[in-house]
């Protein structure tokens, strides 16, 4: 199958650069002749692989280092070492700086010594271990719910929960900026999926007023803190709407636990909402809690349904001992040291205020743990991210199709451990490189 014409032109451009002595020694992305076994399917023929090759070729011709899959040479913290180069790190979910906390490390080591690495089997058929239920009970207590269930993947938690609770006769209303895991869960369920304008509870109210009788069950899905834009919903309004129309509400707190509220309990604490007013609280263990996995918290009946019927729990191995122990230890430190939450919130506000002073576009951010710097087109965003790495700042570009092309941005994750001077110097570097690339033409850069 012939290559994309643009890919061919990019290779010619690269060849010309090589002849001018301007090319680096980076390898050309091309299929390896003879690599395919006789009779096997060549996945390089798929359009998806061709698109990957095209994207990599554009980066190579433009002499950009890929910002993805970078090899970190140190523990994830406010600074990191990539390619023997130390930089300020804004690409980490380590919101409260607990990933390297001695108590968290010690808890994981002790769990390994006592229980080994793997849970060994599904909890349904292999049985419980003494570290499973205590974590779920701790999470339920912190979140103010009756019960909780923990699964081994945050993404799979949303997929399997929505797939279990809803079906073809149901409607799921999702925020237009909702996470992929929720969209995939709706697709699996076969329910009707409708995307509503971001944070627009009034639109949801009006839509359900007209259509609610057409469906058996309705689920409304929002996030506690949106990971691409750094803003939060008006939770009380969504609760009013779902109550009025006999719907369920799911709040994805992957990025709001440990970030919002005086003690880090999330969006309910921050907005003074009764946790029992929300049917389904979802969250992950991989951000604030420095572990891996996801959870659903809510009523005992909800948790019992998932324990016996959710494929992502029933047919999956149970959570590993060191992960459960690390999450419990991190949760205890969060509650014992609310000053970490306060420090994170100060850093978030400081970042937002300083970015606006520098006339950087921060979009919808409310100055919490996530703030984007919106650049515009995807290519220029990738160029600026590459420039920033050379300036000693690691902030990843979020480009199409993850966001609309004209909304491509750099995404900054703040932690409680970032120092104000790190924030200031990094934002000054952003302002400088954005100004330097403001009028750059994509094709001129590719032509060299």
Image (cartoon, rainbow, N blue to C red):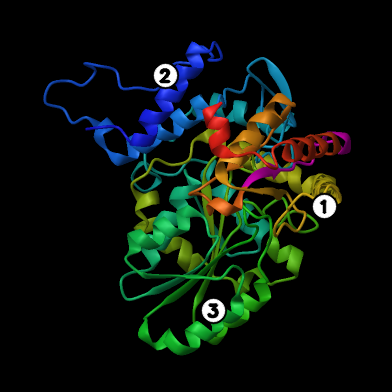
Q: Does residue 275 appear to the left or right of 310 in the view shown?
A: right
Dot 2, crowdedness within 10 Å: few (<14), some or many (≥20)? Answer: few
Mark 2: which secondary structure? loop
Q: Are marks 3 and 2 in contact (CB under 8 Å)?
A: no
In the rendered view, would you say 352 is above or below 75? below
- Is 90 in the magenta? no
Comparing 211 with 27, the one in front is 27
Comparing 439 with 59, the one in front is 439
Quadrant assignment for the C terminus: top right
Q: Does residue 203 appear to the left or right of 374 in the view shown?
A: left
Q: Position of residue 271 (x, y in %)?
A: 74, 68
The residue under label 1 is 356
Q: Which residues are magenta?
A: 409-422
Q: Position of residue 286 (x, y in %)?
A: 59, 42
Mark 3: which secondary structure? helix
Dot 3, crowdedness within 10 Å: few (<14), some or many (≥20)? Answer: many
Q: In which image quadrant can residue 378 be found?
A: top right
At x 65%, y 41%, the residue is 93
- Let me know if residue 212 appears in the view: yes
At x 88%, y 35%, the residue is 421
Q: Does residue 290 appear to the left or right of 271 in the view shown?
A: left
Q: In which image quadrant can residue 437 be found?
A: top right
- Is 413 in the magenta? yes
Q: Position of residue 12 (x, y in %)?
A: 41, 23
What is the CA distance from the residue labelled 1 to the residue labelled 2? 41 Å
The residue under label 2 is 28
């Amino acid at each position: 199958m012939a290559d994309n014409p643009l890919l061919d032109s990019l290779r010619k451009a690269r060849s010309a650069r090589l002849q001018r002595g301007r090319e680096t020694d980076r390898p050309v992305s091309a299929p390896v002749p003879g690599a395919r076994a006789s009779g096997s399917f060549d996945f390089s023929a798929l359009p998806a692989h061709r698109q990957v090759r095209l994207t990599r070729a554009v980066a190579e011709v433009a002499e950009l280092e890929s910002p993805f899959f970078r090899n970190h040479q140190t523990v994830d913290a406010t600074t990191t070492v990539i390619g023997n180069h130390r930089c300020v790190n804004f690409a980490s979910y380590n919101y409260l700086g607990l990933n390297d906390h001695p108590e968290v490390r010690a808890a994981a080591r002790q769990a390994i010594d006592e229980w080994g690495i793997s849970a060994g089997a599904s909890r349904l058929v292999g049985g419980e271990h003494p570290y499973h239920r205590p974590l779920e009970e701790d999470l339920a207590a912190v979140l103010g719910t009756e019960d909780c269930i923990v699964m081994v993947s945050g993404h799979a938690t949303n997929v399997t929960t929505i797939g279990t609770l809803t079906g073809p006769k149901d409607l799921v209303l999702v925020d237009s900026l909702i996470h992929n895991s929720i969209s995939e869960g709706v697709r699996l369920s076969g329910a009707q999926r409708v995307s509503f304008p971001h944070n627009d509870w009034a639109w949801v109210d009006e839509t359900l007023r007209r259509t609610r009788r057409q469906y058996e069950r309705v689920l409304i899905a929002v996030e506690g803190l949106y990971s691409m834009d750094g803003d939060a919903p008006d939770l009380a309004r969504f609760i009013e709407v779902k109550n009025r129309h006999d719907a369920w509400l799911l709040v994805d707190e992957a990025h709001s636990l440990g970030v919002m509220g005086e003690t880090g309990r999330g969006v309910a604490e921050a907005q003074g909402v009764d946790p029992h007013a929300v049917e389904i609280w979802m969250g992950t263990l991989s951000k604030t809690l420095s572990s891996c996995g996801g959870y659903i918290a809510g009523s005992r009946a909800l948790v019992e349904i998932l324990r016996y019927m959710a494929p992502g729990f029933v047919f999956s191995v149970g959570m590993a001992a060191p992960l459960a122990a690390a999450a419990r230890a991190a949760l205890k430190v969060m509650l014992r040291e609310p000053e970490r939450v306060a420090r994170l919130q100060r850093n978030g506000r400081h970042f937002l205020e300083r970015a606006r002073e520098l006339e950087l576009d921060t979009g919808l951010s409310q100055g919490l743990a996530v703030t984007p710097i919106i650049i515009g087109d995807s290519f220029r965003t990738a160029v600026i991210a590459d420039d920033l790495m050379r300036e000693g700042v690691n902030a990843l570009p979020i480009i199409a199709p993850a966001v609309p092309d004209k909304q491509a941005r750099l995404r900054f994750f703040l932690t409680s451990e970032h120092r104000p001077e790190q924030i200031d110097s990094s934002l000054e570097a952003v302002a400088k490189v954005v100004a330097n690339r403001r009028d750059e033409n994509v094709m001129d850069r590719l032509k060299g």
